[in-house]
Amino acid sequence: MLVLSRKEKESILIGNDIEISIVEVSGGRVKIGIDAPKNIQIVRKEVKEAITQENKTAISNKAKLEELKNIMKK
C-alpha cells in the first residue's frame, strides 16, 4: 500500500485517467473528489461489502427454499 500525505486542494494521479483531489479537511474528516472515466466503477467499500453479503444471503436463501420445496413434494 502506498501512503501519501496531501493538503487541501492537492491531488494524486493514478495512471493518466484518474485524479483524486482533497477537497476539504475539517473536524477529522476528509472530503475527496474523484475524476475518472465513466467506464470505471467507483463505490464506497462498505457499500460493496454490504451488497456482496446481501447477494450471498439471497443465494443461500434460494438454496434453502429449493430444498424446502423438494421436501414438501415428497
Image: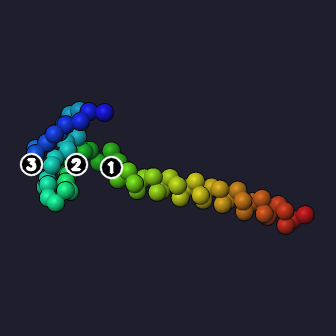
Q: Quadrant for the N terminus, please.
A: top left
Whole-angstrom CA distance, mark 2 to mark 1, is: 9 Å
Compared with 18, 70 (above or below) is below
Q: Mark 3 touching mark 2, by CB under 8 A? A: no
Name the element at disc 3.
loop
In the rendered image, which residue does mark 1 sit on?
42
Closest to the observer: 52 or 2?
A: 2
Q: Is residue 31 visible?
A: no
Whole-angstrom CA distance, mark 3 to mark 2, is: 12 Å
In the rendered image, which residue does mark 2 sit on?
34
User: Which kind of residue does numbered mark 3 sit on?
Assistant: Lys
User: Which kind of residue does numbered mark 1 sit on?
Assistant: Ile
Q: Is residue 62 visible?
A: yes
Outermost residue to the front: 28
Q: Quadrant for the C terminus, please.
A: bottom right
Q: Quadrant of residue 39?
A: top left
Rendered location of residue 72, percent (x, y): 85, 67
Rendered location of residue 62, percent (x, y): 67, 59
Closest to the observer: 62 or 27?
A: 27
In the rendered image, which residue does mark 3 sit on?
9
Give the left or right position of residue 73, taking residue 39 as reference.
Answer: right
Residue at the image point whose x is 16% and y is 39% from the top: 5
User: Which kind of residue does numbered mark 2 sit on?
Assistant: Ile
How packed is label 1: few (under 14 Cα within 10 Å), some, or many (20 or more)? few
Snapshot colouring:
rainbow
Name the element at disc 2.
strand
How packed is label 3: few (under 14 Cα within 10 Å), some, or many (20 or more)? few
Point out the tag, 3 or 2, that comes first from the N-terminus. Answer: 3
Task: Between label 3 and label 1, give the one nearer the viewer.
Answer: 3
Name the element at disc 1.
loop
Residue at the image point whose x is 53% and y is 58% from the top: 54
Residue at the image point whose x is 48% and y is 56% from the top: 51
